[in-house]
Amino acid sequence: MGESYQIDLSIVIVSWNVCELLRQCLHSVENSINPEIKYEIIIVDNCSSDDSVAMLKTEFSQVCLICNADNLGFAKAANQGMKHSRGNYVLLLNPDVRLYEGAVDKMLSFLQANPGVGMVGPYMEGEDAFTRHDFFNHLSLGDSILGSSILGIFPPLLKRRASPLAFDKPVAVESLIGACLLVKREVIQQVGLLDEDYFMYVEDADWCYRVRKAGWLIYYLPSVAIYHQGGQSAARVPEKMYVAIRKSRVLFLLKHRSRLEAILLSASYTLNSTFKIWLGDNNSRQTFRQAASVFRSTTLALFAGCSKF
């Protein structure tokens, strides 16, 4: 971390092969933030093979660009950006987000007016508003199992239970989505950066868990809107992302719940795929192999006494 924080805001964006979305995101930043706010933009490119880096150097030469030789995952790359940041507040922003005018100003104002609040997040519009969610309770064994249930009706029911549309004023929540997450510098200094044991997914829930454990409040601001397209980088490698999200959910339980819950969740993924194959879903055969890989990794980690795998 830098030692002097002489600007208001650092915006950290981790990008991988989403050139056009990144361009739109950066234009939205330029057009939406109050010019009185002193801010910097730090982009960490995770070894993109498209034209992202060339586009940034040509069209947005003012940003701080960090280019990785490999895809280091979201948490490690975001931490690289935060270590280079100089703002009193840090905004983690996904490249598939477009900011509306005044969104950042309102989030900053809320944090400045509430000393006990360490993080805030906005209402996220998207192409699939039914399945989108802006915040959630910490990942429990029950919710994680129901979220991948063979019944198929549980995921929308779970998300509807925590629907952002149910609130018309700021509300304290357990976790926020890392696609647009504003945090105070003093929170980072106290709690630390993202846990790099997570390659992708759930690192935001883990961070929020540690922030609340340290005594800070986390608020969802339904009156502040942004647009989040969601899942654009992950869509390019769906099989790897299937494994990544399930490993991360199991890892969260291993770190913050119990080893028993971690192994039960891991086993449930394999059983879920097995049942779908039994019902005649041949597409689940690949899913079964992936779930079995997660279960195998979890079991080996538990027997080795590790808190990661």
Image (cartoon, rainbow, N blue to C red):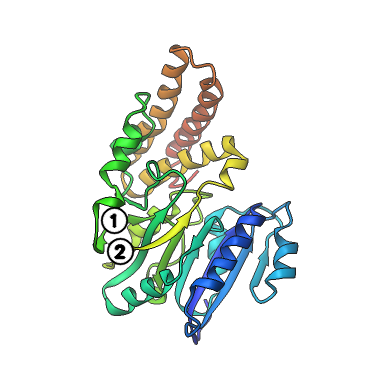
The vertical placement of 265 against 283, above or below, is below
Quadrant in the rendering for residue 67: bottom right
Task: Report the front residue among 150 and 124.
Answer: 124
Please rate how many residues cluster around mark 2, counting C-alpha atoms within 10 Å: few if below 14, some from 14 to 19, many from 20. Answer: many
Q: Position of residue 112 (x, y in %)?
A: 33, 79
Residue at image location 38% in from the left, 76% down from the top = 186
Name the foreground residue: 134 vs 200: 134
- Give the secondary structure at mark 2: strand
The answer to whether the residue labelled 2 contacts the one labelled 1, judged by CB atoms less than 8 Å apart, is yes
Residue at 56% over, 77% down = 40
Q: Residue at x 35, y 59 (%)?
A: 208
Work out whether 49 lies above or below 88.
Answer: above
- The image shows residue 55 at horizontal and vertical percentages of 72, 63
Exactly how many numbered labels are in the figure?
2
| Label number found at residue 118 | none
Residue 158 drawn at (x, y percent): 30, 39
Q: CA distance from mark 2 to mark 1?
A: 7 Å
Report whether 136 appears left or right of 105. Answer: left
Residue 210 seen anywhere in this rendered image of the structure: yes
Left or right placement of residue 66 versus residue 130 in this view = right
**If you read the primary sequence from the N terminus, does the residue marked by circle 2 or circle 1 appear first?**
1
x and y, in percent, of residue 195 in the image: 46, 57
**Rendered image quadrant of residue 20:** bottom right
Can residue 84 be seen in the rendering of this structure?
no
- Quadrant position of residue 220: bottom left
Relative vertical location of residue 234 with respect to residue 64 in this rendering, above or below: above
Q: Which mark is residue 218?
A: 2
Q: Amino acid at mark 1?
A: Glu
Q: Which mark is residue 174?
A: 1
Amino acid found under the numbered disc labelled 2:
Ile
Q: Is residue 214 above or below residue 270?
A: below
